[in-house]
Image: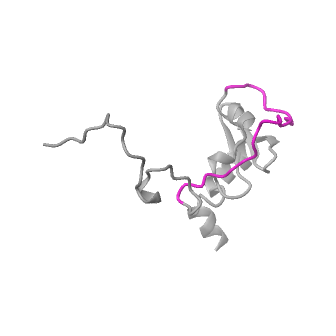
Amino acid sequence: MGLLRALFIWWRDATAGTLVTTWLTGVFVGRDAYGNRYYRSRKGGRRWVLYKDIVDGSKVPAEWHGWLHRTIELPPVDSVRKPWEKGHMPNLSGTSAAYYPSGSLMRGGRRISARGDYEPWSP
C-alpha cells in the first residue's frame, strides 16, 4: 500500500517522482519552523519544498515563499517572529470551519437590505 499511496496520493506527501528528483539532483537548503524541508537543484535552476504533513501551500512561511519564488536569493536564516505576526492558520476552504461572509448562501443567504440605491433588473 505504501508504494501505491506514494504514486497516486500526491496531496498526502511528496510523489515518487519528486522524491527521486530530490534524491538525485536536490541539495538540502534548510528547514522551517513547521518541519518543511527546502531544496534546490545542483545547478541552481529549481527550488522546491517537501512538506512535513499534508501538502498545503499555505504552510510555507513568508520568508521561505520569497526564497522559493526568487524574490530573495539567499535562503532565510532562523527568523524571529514579530509581535504583530499571527501564527499559521491552515486553508480551511471546503471544511466545516470555512469562512463565509454575511450574505453568503452558505450562511442562509441573508444580507442587509439596500438603502434605496439598488434597483433589480427587470426585462
- Could you say where residue 12 lies in the image, as x and y percent from the top left? 64, 61
Looking at the rendering, the stretch of residues picked out in magenta corresponds to 71-94
Q: Main secondary structure of the magenta part?
A: loop
Position of residue 67 measured from the top left corner of the image (x, y, whole percent): 71, 32
Is residue 73 shown in magenta?
A: yes
Q: Was residue 90 drawn as part of the magenta stretch in this picture? A: yes
Q: Is residue 91 left or right of residue 111?
A: right
Position of the N terminus, as image quadrant, is bottom right
Question: Is 6 left, or right, of 113 in this rendering?
Answer: right
x then y, percent, for residue 112:
42, 47
Q: Residue at x 58, y 63 (%)?
A: 9
State whether residue 25 is above or below residue 72. below
Image coloring type:
one colour
Check the picture and name the quadrant holding the C terminus: top left
Image side of residue 36 versus residue 4, left or right = right
> Image height check: is 97 above or below 56?
below
Q: Which residue appears at 60% of the width and 58% of the height?
A: 11
Which residue lies at the image location 73% right of the left edge and 36% below the top edge?
64
